[in-house]
């Protein structure tokens, strides 16, 4: 399933290709999606390419080909009051508090907000309609929420595609901690946090992925990983 912004960009590219036979520029895409920088467009295009919706034609500037469009009923759903492409920002202030499950005293219901990238970052869309049951022994003090892991960049840390990450809400974390990080107020990703001087590194646990370096004002911690759930 595409995120709202990925869907919006794909439809825009397809419309421009049909209208004039050439894909829009990155500046045009940035303006159409109301993004502040072209880096967000680069990440959205990479995500669409990885999911098989578009491909870049080699040796040609601004050359994109739409390979397929999403099914009508696969369009991202919007929560009432949210705009297209809304992301869970800040410190998840809208997170539902953990609630005791009626099925057992040792189970806690946590809100399952959506998918978090353990690979190329994707938007973490809010979905308050889903919950996951978590053993209370896995939780410590504080507020928690759950996210489904997408991607393989954290496999060497034992985090696999499809796992459910249990996150303790916080806005700071020590070096080496695996965190939910919000990049450029746009995309959330699950990575190991490293700080050196004024730089912030988001480090993968898979040699196939590069460590990404940002300025301190581009990354905000939204929580730290405390547990994983996995289905077999």
Image: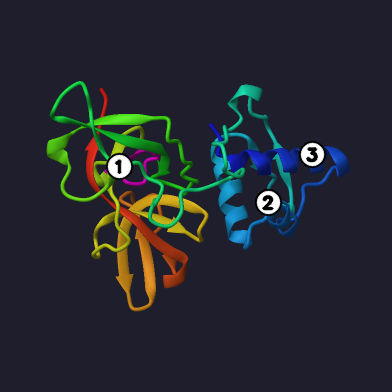
> First in sequence: mark 3 or mark 2?
3
Q: Quadrant of the C terminus?
A: top left
Camera-nearest residue between 180 and 84: 84
Camera-nearest residue between 7 and 24: 7
> Disc number at residue 97?
1
Looking at the rendered image, the disc whose residue lies closer to the viewer, 1 or 3, is: 1
| Residue 206 image position (x, y, % from top left) | 33, 49
Residue found at the very far right of the displayed protein = 20
Q: CA distance from mark 1 to mark 3?
A: 42 Å
Looking at the rendered image, the disc whose residue lies closer to the viewer, 1 or 2, is: 1
| Residue 214 image position (x, y, % from top left) | 44, 67
Please give the name of the residue rendered at 77% of the width and 47% of the height, measured from the top-left corner: 23
Taking the image as shown, residue 198 lies to the left or right of residue 42, namely: left
> Disc number at residue 15?
3
Q: For residue 93: magenta?
A: no
Camera-nearest residue between 11 and 50: 11
Looking at the rendered image, the disc whose residue lies closer to the viewer, 3 or 2, is: 2
Please give the name of the residue rendered at 43% of the width and 30% of the height, measured from the top-left corner: 129
Question: For residue 73, which quarter of the picture?
Answer: top right
Q: Which residue in the structure is indicated by mark 2? A: 33
Taking the image as shown, residue 49 lies to the left or right of residue 182, namely: right
| Residue 64 image position (x, y, % from top left) | 71, 44
Taking the image as shown, residue 181 lies to the left or right of residue 26, namely: left
Number of marks in picture: 3
Q: Secondary structure at mark 1?
A: loop
Q: CA distance from mark 3 to mark 2?
A: 14 Å
Task: Please provide the residue range marked out in magenta.
Answer: 145-155
Residue 178 seen in render: yes
């Amino acid at each position: 399933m595409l995120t709202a912004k990925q869907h919006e960009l794909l439809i825009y590219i397809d419309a421009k290709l049909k209208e004039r036979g050439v894909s829009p520029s990155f500046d045009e895409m940035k303006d159409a999606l109301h993004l502040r920088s072209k880096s967000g467009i680069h990440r959205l295009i990479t995500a669409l390419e990885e999911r098989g919706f578009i491909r870049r034609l080699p040796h040609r500037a601004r050359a994109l080909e739409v390979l397929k469009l999403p099914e009508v009923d696969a369009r991202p759903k919007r929560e009432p009051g949210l705009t297209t492409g809304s992301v869970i920002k800040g410190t998840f202030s809208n997170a539902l508090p953990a609630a005791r499950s009626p099925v057992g005293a040792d189970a806690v219901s946590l809100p399952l907000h959506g998918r978090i990238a353990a690979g190329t970052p994707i938007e973490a869309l809010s979905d308050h309609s889903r919950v996951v049951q978590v053993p209370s022994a896995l939780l410590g003090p504080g507020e928690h929420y759950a996210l489904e892991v997408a991607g393989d960049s954290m496999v060497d840390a034992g985090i696999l595609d499809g796992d459910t990450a249990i996150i303790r809400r916080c806005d700071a974390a020590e070096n080496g901690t695996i965190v939910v990080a919000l990049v450029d107020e746009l995309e959330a990703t699950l990575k190991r946090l490293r700080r050196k001087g004024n730089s912030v590194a988001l480090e993968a646990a898979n040699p196939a992925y590069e460590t990404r370096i940002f300025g301190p004002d581009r990354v905000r911690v939204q929580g730290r990983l405390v547990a994983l759930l996995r289905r077999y």
